[in-house]
Image (cartoon, rainbow, N blue to C red):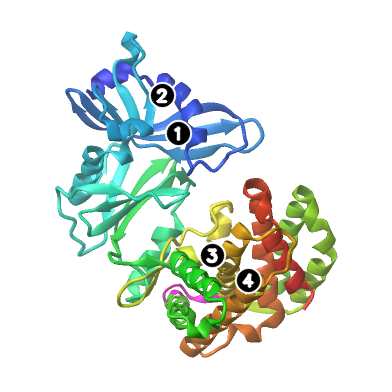
């Protein structure tokens, strides 16, 4: 079938169809920008059978107003498409010879997923694609898979209910920090992450580049965001009870979560070491992001003088100890298993260049990310139900929940690490504000009705 695909769907055919298909995928990172062209960078055949085929595809996407981006689009080909694959169609027959087969997102097809599982079990090289296994790891052939639906920026597939294959959708040339940091944490025996078992890479434009990774699947786990929302929901329903009086009080879990984050920071320090950066360098990056955000979101202008004053205070602090950190930590990046909390997704903020994501930073960036996430979780239900601008008892109680759980998280972090992040007052507040500035831009682009939440945080943090 692969030979037939080469006739029926040339690179040019696929490029033209992907121009229309890509903007509708939720992992597509350039929504709002017009695609001017798509170019195939890598097309590795995976199967060639009668009525069925598959390609591993990487494409460069060009735009009218933003730099080129690279995306990974595993494709399946079928002469007859099962109903459950219809929503993932890239191209469908229209009665002409050139459209004799369906083209679809291969990661939604168990048969295509099985091709990846078997290739990982064999390891080795397929054309320009190399499958690498951690020494001692064994991946069994024949595992069936199912794609998870919760992710925004990547696609993860559960293999045999044992392993998780994460396919990075937007590709940045170089080694992905998710693989790099998981390998470092494995070296020091960290138990607060799911062990990495394998990864997939390829040579793209002369650069060794990560395409995917495989790690243990955390079965019977719940993500921190869902658990936190449940706790807030129950608190707001029980109008006469305090947060510590409801059965789903989250403070104990927040404390254990803080300890897990501190342990991962300690393991990253052990495995990759530390250095120093002038606080003025950290503050300069914050100022650049503030200026860019203020130029895009008018509502931010009123807060700029106070935020600049806070960043100037940070710039005067002198050298600051830095190390590798998670870089994009929030409640959605932690899983509660029956035994412990696990940290996941060490890619860093996807919007940042890879070199910036790999820069050492202070652990306070991760702490600040979690504190902002507690604030979001607390006000999530309130923002859905309350009129904008109305100070309600529900909002007050949500704020108390955020304070209680932020405090418990910091207590847990301090107990495990020996230092309390709250002692770094101005620097921690600056990281929280920097994260809130990022949130302002995100909300302005995607959920304008939520813009008040990060703006309120900036008001509170920049004017203590």
Q: Position of residue 394 (x, y in %)?
A: 63, 71
Q: Position of residue 442 (x, y in %)?
A: 64, 52
Q: Count every numbered label the image shows and give the total.
A: 4
Which of pointers 2 and 1 indicates the residue nearer the eye?
Answer: 2
Q: Is residue 382 above or below residue 441?
A: below
Marks 4/1 in contact by CB < 8 Å: the verdict is no
> Callout 3: 10 Å neighbours few (<14), some, many (20+)?
many
- Label 4: element kind: helix
Look at mark 2 in the image and give the residue it sits on: 14
Look at mark 1 in the image and give the residue it sits on: 59
Look at mark 3 in the image and give the residue it sits on: 327
Residue at 69% from the left image edge and 82% from the top image edge: 425
- Specify the quadrant that holds the C terminus: bottom right
> Callout 2: 10 Å neighbours few (<14), some, many (20+)?
some
Q: CA distance from mark 3 to mark 1?
A: 27 Å
Examine the structure image and report whether residue 269 is included in the region drawn in magenta.
Answer: yes
Residue at 47% from the left image edge and 78% from the top image edge: 250
Look at mark 4 in the image and give the residue it sits on: 394
Give the mark, 4 or 3, whose residue is nearer the N terminus: 3
The boundaries of the magenta stretch are: 268-275
Give the mark, 2 or 1, whose residue is nearer the N terminus: 2
Residue at 84% from the left image edge and 60% from the top image edge: 302
Give the mark, 4 or 1, whose residue is nearer the N terminus: 1
- Label 1: element kind: strand
Marks 2/1 in contact by CB < 8 Å: the verdict is yes
Q: CA distance from mark 2 to mark 4?
A: 52 Å
In front here: 111 or 175? 111
- Label 2: element kind: helix
């Amino acid at each position: 079938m692969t030979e037939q695909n080469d006739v029926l769907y040339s690179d040019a055919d696929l490029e033209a169809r992907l121009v229309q298909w890509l903007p509708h995928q939720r992992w597509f990172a350039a929504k709002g920008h017009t695609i001017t062209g798509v170019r195939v960078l890598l097309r590795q055949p995976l199967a060639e059978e009668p009525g069925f085929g598959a390609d591993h595809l990487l494409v460069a996407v060009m735009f009218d107003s933003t730099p080129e981006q690279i995306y990974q689009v595993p494709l399946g080909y079928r002469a007859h498409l099962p109903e459950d694959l219809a929503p993932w169609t890239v191209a469908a027959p229209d009665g002409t010879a050139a459209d004799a087969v369906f083209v679809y997102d291969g990661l939604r097809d168990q048969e295509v997923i099985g091709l990846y599982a078997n290739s990982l079990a064999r390891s080795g090289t397929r054309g320009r694609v190399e499958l690498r296994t951690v020494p001692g790891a064994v991946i069994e052939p024949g595992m069936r898979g199912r794609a998870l639906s919760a992710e925004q920026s990547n696609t993860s597939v559960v293999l045999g209910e044992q392993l998780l294959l994460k396919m990075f959708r937007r590709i940045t040339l170089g080694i992905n920090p998710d693989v790099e940091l998981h390998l470092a944490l494995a070296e020091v025996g960290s138990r607060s992450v799911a062990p990495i078992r394998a990864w997939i890479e390829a040579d793209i434009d002369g650069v060794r580049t990560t395409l995917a990774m495989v790690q243990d699947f955390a079965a019977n786990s719940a993500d921190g965001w869902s658990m936190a929302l449940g706790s807030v929901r129950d608190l707001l329903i029980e109008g006469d009870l305090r947060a510590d009086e409801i059965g789903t009080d989250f403070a104990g879990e927040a404390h254990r979560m803080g300890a897990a984050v501190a342990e991962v920071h300690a393991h990253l320090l052990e495995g990759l070491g530390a250095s120093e950066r002038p606080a003025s360098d950290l503050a300069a990056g914050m100022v650049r992001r503030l200026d860019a955000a203020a130029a895009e979101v008018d509502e931010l202008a009123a807060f700029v003088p106070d935020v600049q004053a806070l960043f100037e205070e940070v710039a005067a602090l002198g050298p600051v100890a830095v190390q590798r950190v998670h870089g994009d930590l929030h409640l959605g990046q932690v899983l509660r298993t029956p035994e412990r909390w696990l940290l996941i997704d060490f890619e860093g903020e996807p919007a940042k260049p890879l070199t910036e994501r790999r820069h050492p930073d202070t652990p306070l960036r991760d702490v600040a990310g979690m504190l902002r996430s507690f604030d979001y979780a607390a006000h999530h239900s309130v923002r859905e139900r309350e009129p904008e601008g109305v100070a309600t008892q529900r909002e007050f109680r949500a704020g108390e929940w955020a304070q209680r759980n932020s405090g418990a998280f910091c207590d847990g972090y301090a107990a495990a690490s020996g230092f309390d992040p709250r002692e770094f007052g101005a620097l921690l507040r600056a990281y929280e504000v920097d994260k809130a500035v990022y949130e302002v831009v995100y909300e302005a682009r995607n959920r304008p009705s939520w813009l008040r939440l990060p703006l309120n945080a900036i008001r509170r943090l920049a004017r203590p």
